[in-house]
Structures are given as structure tokens and as C-alpha cells.
Image (spheres, rainbow, N blue to C red):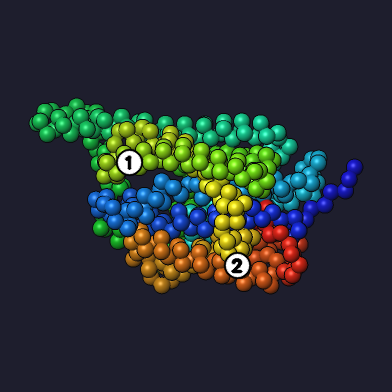
């Protein structure tokens, strides 16, 4: 029997394609998170007023059709692959050092997730979710690709049904409410069911269109302390411990299992031919953007108000559009990587990816300082938030490149590794010799 030891990945074991992917994902996650960071958590989440083709609505449409969910999807795929890499030396039971480090890492991620909402005031963080879901991944450490793919499909379909089914009830309520509104306009008496449906639709619309008093109340919570901490805590608890938390865990598990399968199929490391990634990008985007485009067109036509059709299909179609766009993004990024099309930008993306956890945390810190510390909460348009996002990307790129000129890992990666392996890790000076730069997820 070989002696198995637990330790962090060495610089020489890194894979450049994984860091590029992770850099894109970390930047893209901010693109999706920043509206909730800088805008009220109540309301529709899109630009105010009637939909028109201006900068705000165009940027919103591009974000929702092309990027929504796919950045988180890509990051989750990579997390699954990273956890598999961590277990690569395990050949036995859960008492071996690699397994012990793995479990410690999962619980450490949960603690870092708590720090995200409690210290950095970002309750929409994903680290707690990843830590919990990572525990389940251990069961699949030796699974064949077909098992991983089948399990991912089963979990994703089950979760989609669980999320989509309540929409059927809302759709029926909206249909009855529409008939009731027509009867009311014709001065016909309403049945009890019709009256209840009108009340239910009114509640739906009130959630989409909060009053000035409700918005002022949220502003008070988001612009003072300790009210801000109370808001962050309540939001985080609802997101991770109640409500749809189980569905989010299932979604993460499905994408992590898929990430493990793709890594074993030599897809994530960029080892397939260029044509494979071009076809993956074309096929993924063709399916995903078609589904999402049709949904977005229906929402535009409805003025982004609830309709029976959207209520009935929206939940079921979300993952049907999200999964192929995530795969399309994966194919596109790796095709550009193989073509060396990123140019000088690739070095910055690799650096951001190598410091993925540090940069994810830095995004929380910078947005909290901007929106809460400097008082810019709810001051920007949607397009303005996208511009702020681009500015933060620049900060992350410069910081990451400069940091890695001196140190081998970021401060958050250092903390996670130290917790994982039960001893303080050396930050490590960067080796000047040519070393491939890409890593399993920190």
C-alpha cells in the first residue's frame, strides 16, 4: 500500500486553461451580483419604466439572455473539478489524510460563507452553498463518467420540476384573475375563487412594484449600521437555510457532478481539439440563447409583468436555457484560449483565476465600501452598475498581477489552505522560472 499524504497543489501542477476559465467566472459573477449589491432587494430587478431600447435596457437584456446564471454555472463546474483534483490521491476510506483535508475544506468554505455576509455584507454569497454541496461530492469520487452525467441529469431534472411546479399554480391564479378582471369590467358578479385570484395577483404586482415607503424602509436598512447587518443576516438565512435553499443546493450539486465528468473527459483542461470547443460553443449558445431569447421576448411583450404563460413555463425553462449557455461559454472561452485570442488579457485572467477566492472576497469588500461606506446605494442606473463592474474588473486584474509577482497564493487562498491542512501555510514567493499557471479551485 502506498503512503498517502495530504497537501496543497504545487505550482507546477497547475493547468492554464482552468485559471483562464476561473478568471472569466469570477469576473462574470460580479456582473450578475452587482444589481443586488447596489439596488434594492425588493422590486423587479430591471430598469424602471416601460421597456425601451436605451443603454440600460439593452445592457439588462444582454446580461439576462447571454450571461445570467452561466457565470455561476461555469464557476460551479470548476469547483466540482477542483474538488475532484483534491481527491486525486485518495485510494481508500474516509480516514485517510486527503479525505480529512477534503472534509475540512468543505466546512471551512461554510465558515468563509458566513464571513461573506457577516463581515463583508454580501448575503448572496455562494461559498456556504459550495461547502455543503461539496460534502455530497465525496460519494462520487470514484464514479465513472456515465454515473456522473446520469446523476447530474437526474438531479437537474428533479430540481427543475421542484422549482417549476409552483409556477403552474401561479399561472392558474393569473388566468382566473384575468377572467375576473374581464367580468369586473363588464359589471358581472364575481365568484369567491375569482375574488381570491384578484387578491393574489394584486400581491404579486405589489412585490414587483414596491411603494416609495417600502423602498425608503429598505434604504434605511441598507444605509445604517447595525440595520445593514440585520438585513444581510436575514437575506442570507432565507437564501441558504429556508425557502428555496434545497433547490439551490440541488442545482449546485448537478453542475459540480457535471464539472467532475467534464474534467475526467479532458474538456475543462483544454485538452480537446479546437474544433470540439468551437462546436460546444456554437451548439450551447444556439440552444441556450434560443430558449432565453424567446422567454425574454415574451417578457418584453408583457412589459415584464406576470402572465399565465410565463408563470407556467419560466421555472421549467430556466435550467433548460442556463445549462447550454454555460456549456457555450465554456466552449467559447477555451476556443479563444487555444487560439491565443485573449492576447495580453490572458495573463490578467489567469492571475484573477489563481486568486479566485481572494478576488471573490475583494468584490464583496469593494462593493460594500462603494455602496454602503461611500453612500452610493441605489444611485446608479443599470448601465451605470455595469460600468462599475468593469472598473472593478480592472482593479482585480491589476491587483492580481502585482500580487502574484511576489506571492504564490492570495490571502484568502492562504487562509483556506491553512484551515484545510491544519497548519499555517507559507504564502510562498513566486518562482521566476516558467511555471504553468492554473489551479484547482481554492
Split into 4 quadrants, where in the image is the C terminus?
bottom right
Residue 95, given in percent of the width and then of the height, sits at 79, 45
Question: Residue at label 2?
Answer: 400
- The residue lying at 25 percent from left, 29 percent from top is 176
Q: Nearer the viewer, residue 411 or 200?
A: 411
Quarter residue 170 falls in? top left
- The residue lying at 64 percent from left, 66 percent from top is 411
Q: Earlier in the sequence, mark 1 or mark 2?
A: 1
Question: Residue at label 1?
Answer: 297
The answer to whether residue 223 of the structure is visible from this angle is: no
What is the CA distance from the residue labelled 1 to the residue labelled 2?
39 Å
Q: Secondary structure at mark 2?
A: helix
Residue 14, given in percent of the width and then of the height, sits at 71, 56
Residue lying furthest right in this view?
Answer: 1
Taking the image as shown, residue 158 lies to the left or right of residue 170, namely right
Split into 4 quadrants, where in the image is the N terminus?
top right
Q: Residues within 10 Å of mark 1 (few under 14, many from 20)?
A: few
Taking the image as shown, residue 4 lies to the left or right of residue 18, namely right
Q: Secondary structure at mark 1?
A: helix
- The residue lying at 48 percent from left, 42 percent from top is 285
Asked whether the residues under the numbered discs 1 and 2 touch, taking CB atoms below 8 Å apart as contact, a structural biologist would say no
Residue 269, given in percent of the width and then of the height, sits at 66, 48
- The residue lying at 48 percent from left, 54 percent from top is 124
Is the residue 27 above or below the residue 261 in the image? Answer: below
Residue 235, given in percent of the width and then of the height, sits at 45, 53
Q: Nearer the viewer, residue 197 or 126?
A: 126
Amino acid at each position: 500500500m502506498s503512503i498517502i499524504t495530504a497537501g496543497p497543489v504545487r505550482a507546477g501542477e497547475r493547468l492554464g486553461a482552468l485559471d483562464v476559465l476561473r478568471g472569466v467566472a469570477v469576473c462574470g459573477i460580479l456582473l450578475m451580483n452587482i444589481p443586488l449589491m447596489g439596488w434594492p432587494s425588493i422590486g423587479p430587478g430591471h430598469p424602471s419604466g416601460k421597456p425601451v431600447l436605451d443603454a440600460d435596457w439593452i445592457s439588462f437584456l444582454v446580461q439576462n439572455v447571454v450571461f445570467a446564471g452561466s457565470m455561476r454555472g461555469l464557476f460551479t463546474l470548476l469547483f466540482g473539478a477542483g474538488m475532484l483534483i483534491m481527491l486525486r490521491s485518495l485510494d481508500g476510506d474516509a480516514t485517510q489524510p486527503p479525505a480529512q483535508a477534503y472534509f475540512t475544506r468543505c466546512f471551512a468554505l461554510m465558515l468563509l460563507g458566513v464571513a461573506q455576509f457577516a463581515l463583508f455584507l454580501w448575503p448572496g454569497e455562494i461559498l456556504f452553498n459550495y461547502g455543503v454541496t461539496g460534502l455530497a461530492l465525496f460519494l462520487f469520487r470514484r464514479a465513472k463518467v456515465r454515473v456522473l452525467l446520469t446523476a447530474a441529469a437526474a438531479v437537474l431534472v428533479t430540481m427543475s420540476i421542484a422549482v417549476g411546479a409552483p409556477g403552474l399554480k401561479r399561472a392558474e391564479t393569473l388566468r382566473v384573475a384575468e377572467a375576473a378582471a374581464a367580468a369586473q369590467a363588464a359589471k358581472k358578479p364575481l365568484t369567491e375563487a375569482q375574488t381570491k385570484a384578484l387578491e393574489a395577483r394584486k400581491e404579486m404586482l405589489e412585490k414587483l412594484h414596491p411603494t416609495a415607503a417600502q423602498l425608503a424602509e429598505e434604504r434605511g436598512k441598507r444605509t445604517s449600521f447595525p440595520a445593514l447587518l440585520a438585513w444581510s443576516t436575514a437575506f442570507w438565512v432565507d437564501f441558504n437555510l429556508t425557502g428555496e435553499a434545497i433547490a439551490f443546493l440541488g442545482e449546485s450539486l448537478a453542475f459540480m457532478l457535471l464539472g467532475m465528468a467534464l474534467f475526467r473527459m479532458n474538456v475543462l483542461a483544454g485538452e480537446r481539439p479546437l474544433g470540439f470547443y468551437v462546436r460546444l460553443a456554437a451548439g450551447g449558445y444556439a440552444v441556450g440563447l434560443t430558449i432565453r431569447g424567446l422567454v425574454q421576448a415574451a417578457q418584453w411583450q408583457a412589459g415584464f409583468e406576470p402572465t399565465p404563460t410565463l408563470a407556467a413555463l419560466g421555472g421549467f425553462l430556466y435550467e433548460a436555457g442556463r445549462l447550454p449557455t454555460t456549456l457555450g461559454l465554456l466552449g467559447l472561452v477555451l476556443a479563444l484560449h487555444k487560439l491565443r485570442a485573449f492576447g495580453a488579457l490572458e495573463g490578467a485572467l489567469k492571475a484573477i483565476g489563481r486568486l479566485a477566492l481572494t478576488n471573490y472576497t475583494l468584490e464583496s469588500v469593494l462593493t460594500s465600501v462603494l455602496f454602503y461606506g461611500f453612500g452610493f446605494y441605489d444611485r446608479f442606473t443599470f448601465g451605470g452598475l455595469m460600468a462599475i463592474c468593469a472598473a472593478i474588473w480592472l482593479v482585480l486584474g491589476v491587483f492580481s498581477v502585482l500580487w502574484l509577482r511576489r506571492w504564490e497564493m492570495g490571502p484568502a487562498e492562504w487562509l483556506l489552505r491553512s484551515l484545510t491542512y491544519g497548519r499555517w501555510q507559507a504564502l510562498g514567493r513566486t518562482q521566476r522560472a516558467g511555471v504553468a499557471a492554473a489551479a484547482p479551485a481554492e
